[in-house]
Image (cartoon, rainbow, N blue to C red):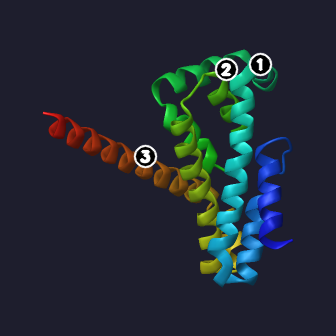
Amino acid sequence: YGSWGLFAAAFLDSSFLTFPILNDLFVFWLSVRRPERMLFYATMTALGSILGCLLIYLLAKKGGEAVLRRKARPEQVERIARWYERYKFLTIAIPAVLPPPAPFKVFIISAGVFQVRLRHFLTAVVLGRGVRYYLVGFLAVRYGEQGITFVSQNFLQVSLLAAVLVGVGFLLLRLASRARTARSQQSSS
C-alpha cells in the first residue's frame, strides 16, 4: 500500500498495536526500491507515528495513570516522573528516536499522565520521529541493501548518532526560544 500503508502501520504502531521495527524496515525497503520517494516515505511514516502518539497522549491525559501503572513497574514510573520534572523535552525525544526495545509507549503515556504541555510533547515527538525515519531513509538511499548490514553492525553508533541529532535539535530550539524571549523583552522595554 506504499506511503498510505506506511502511514497506517505507523499510526497503529504508535497508538494501539505494536509492530517493533516494522516501520523502519518498511521505510528502508521502500526507499531502497524508490530512492526518489524516500522523503515522502519518511514523512508519511513520521506523520502516522506522530498522530498515533498524539492519540495515546490525549487519552492518557484524560485518565491514563492506571494504564501507566499496568505497563511499567513502580520504580520505572518514579524514574520517568523524575526525568519529566527535569527534562520534559528529552524524556520524550530520546525514546522517540531509539529503535526497539526502547519502551516508547510508556513515555508517551507518561507525558499525558504527567500533563506535559502539548507544545513540548509535539515538538519532541516530531523531532524524534522525524530524525528516526529520515535517518532510516537516508541510510537506505546511501547504502542500499547493504544498509541493513551496516545498521546491524553499527547499531550502537547509529542509535547514538540519532540521539545526538535530537540533542542538537533540542539545543537549537532552546537557543531560538531564548532569542525570541530576549527580543520580546527588548521590544517591551
Q: At x 49% / y 50%, what residue is drawn? A: 166
Q: Is 26 left or right of 176, judged from the image as shown?
A: right
Residue 103 shows up from this direction: no
Q: Is 158 left or right of 182, judged from the image as shown?
A: right
**Can you say which quadrant of the picture contains the N terminus?**
bottom right
- 163 to 23, vertically: above or below: above
Could you tell me how far apart the alpha carbons at marks 2 and 1 are, in whole angstroms? 7 Å
SS type, badge 2: helix
Residue 141 in which image quadrant: bottom right
SS type, badge 3: helix
Q: Please state which amino acid type lies under the numbered disc 3.
A: Phe
Residue annotated with mark 1? 69
Circle 1 crowding by C-alpha within 10 Å: few under 14, some 14–19, many from 20:
some
Residue 45 in which image quadrant: bottom right
Mark earlier in primary sequence (3, 2): 2
Residue annotated with mark 2? 77
Residue 48 shows up from this direction: yes
Mark earlier in primary sequence (3, 1): 1
Q: For this rendering, which residue is in front, 158 or 166?
A: 166
Asked if the residue at tag 1 contacts the one at tag 2, i.e. Cβ–Cβ closer than 8 Å, the answer is yes
Could you tell me how far apart the alpha carbons at marks 3 and 1 are, in whole angstroms? 29 Å
Q: At x 82% / y 57%, what residue is drawn? A: 9
Q: For this rendering, which residue is in front, 182 or 70?
A: 182
Q: Is 173 left or right of 187, judged from the image as shown?
A: right
Q: Residue furthest left?
A: 189
The percent position of residue 138, horizontal first and vertical second, equals 59, 72
- 36 to 121, vertically: above or below: below
Q: Report the number of discs.
A: 3
The percent position of residue 135, horizontal first and vertical second, equals 59, 65
Residue annotated with mark 3? 170
Q: At x 72% / y 70%, what residue is drawn? A: 28
Q: Please state which amino acid type lies under the numbered disc 1.
A: Arg
